[in-house]
Image: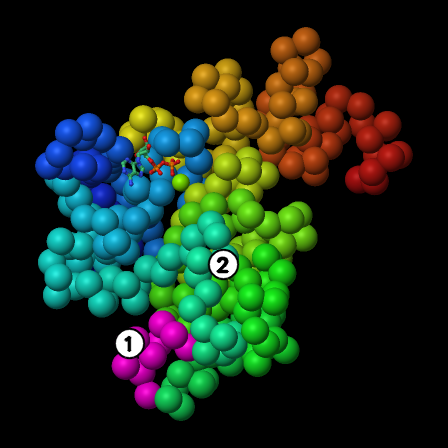
Amino acid sequence: MDPGSDVIIETENLVYSYNQSGEGEMQALNGVSLSIVRGEFVAIIGRNGSGKSTLAKHFNALFLPTSGNVHINGMNTKDPDNLWRIRQTVGMVFQNPDNQIVSTTVEEDVAFGPENLGIPAAEIRRRVDLALKWVGMSEHVRHAPHLLSGGQKQRVAIAGVLAMKPQCIVLDEPTAMLDPSGRREVLETVKRLNEEDGITVVLITHFMSEAILGERVIVMDSGKIVMDDVPGKIFNQVELLRQLDLDVPQVTQLAHELAESGVPVARDALTIKEFINSLHGLYPSVITATYGE
Ligand code: ADP
Ligand code: MG
């Protein structure tokens, strides 16, 4: 087998400038090199303007590099012959669900992508039903999308992407405009797609509680990747994250402050469960009495 065949997204020294010809050229990406492997769940974080959305738009050839290269399954995004295969391979979900609605019923909306691919009607029907089932929206098939809640609309947008049978979904702050229950619905759906269907997920988020869902976290700043590691190793660097204007998960913050004041707890707890486990060694009888073994 080709040694690079497990890599689904690859960027090599990717540079992107807005307003390339005119005045006020703005270099939004300053040499980004990364590889994302099939089946990974990668979270991308970084302060506003760090280049996350610009990077994401290169993953399905919405943007083409000013210099450097982007390969999707080995296909160079600069080659127009690859465009449709790339768009089928990597689906995008954006922040505002209202901007992603194109039709007057949920089923037409989900069918829009596969229709554009010229897929036969019977196969589209099958894909629409399956995609809506996946995101838990089957009972809304004939409803008007604009009447749904934000979380439901985002799940319909995800179904529209799934109906194209992508290998990878890139979500650019998909929960930013949702209430907590909408956020939960969307994240559970995405997590399930990754775990049960093996779909590669790239989740751009400014919620640290979402970033820890990834098995890998990439941190961007000024158009560059500044950190790329497992969440535990990223979020225990509290001072560095603060310099980058990023939060840490609340539990990690607490563990960090306790550790700083001399309490011997593990600094890399990301969830309450991990934090409690790290306390076990310290106060075994109290913790066991309160939370069990
Ligand atoms: P993020 O998604 O991390 O907030 P973006 O990729 O949207 O960052 O933006 C990266 C940089 O590019 C920012 O400095 C932003 O101001 C600039 N930028 C984004 N979109 C445009 C545009 N359409 N024209 C000019 N500059 C832009
Ligand atoms: Mg953005």
Q: Crowding at label 2, few (<14), some or many (≥20) Cα neighbours within 10 Å?
A: some
Give the residue drawn at x 23%, y 67%. Answer: 85
Q: CA distance from mark 1 to mark 2?
A: 23 Å
| Residue 277 in view, yes or no | no
Specify the farthest residue to the top. 261
**Which residue is depicted at the point 30% across and 49% down?**
57
**Residue 140 x/y as whole percent:** 61, 75
- Residue 165 versus residue 63: which sits nearer the camera? 63
Discs 1/2, front: 2
Q: Which residue of the protein is positioned furthest toward the front in this rendering?
A: 23
The secondary structure that most of the magenta stretch takes on is helix
Q: Is residue 199 on the magenta stretch?
A: no
Query: Is the CB of the residue bearing disc 1 within 8 angstroms of ligand 2?
Result: no
Q: Amino acid at mark 1?
A: Leu
Residue denoted by label 2: 98
- State whether residue 286 is above or below residue 293: above
For the residue pair 96 and 16, the one nearer the viewer reads as 96
Up-down relation of residue 53 to residue 109 (above or below):
above
Residue 242 visible at all:
yes
Q: Nearer the viewer, residue 37 or 29?
A: 29
What residue is pinned by disc 1?
117
Q: List x then y, in percent, for residue 188.
A: 59, 56
Ligand 1 is found in which quarter of the picture? top left
Report if residue 114 lies within the magenta region.
yes
Location of residue 196 in the rendering, given as x and y in whole percent from the top left corner: 51, 64
SS class, disc 1: loop
> Residue 283, located in which quarter of the rendered image?
top right
The residue at the point 26 percent across, 54 percent down is 62
Circles 1, 2 touching at the beta carbon (< 8 Å): no
Magenta segment: 110-120
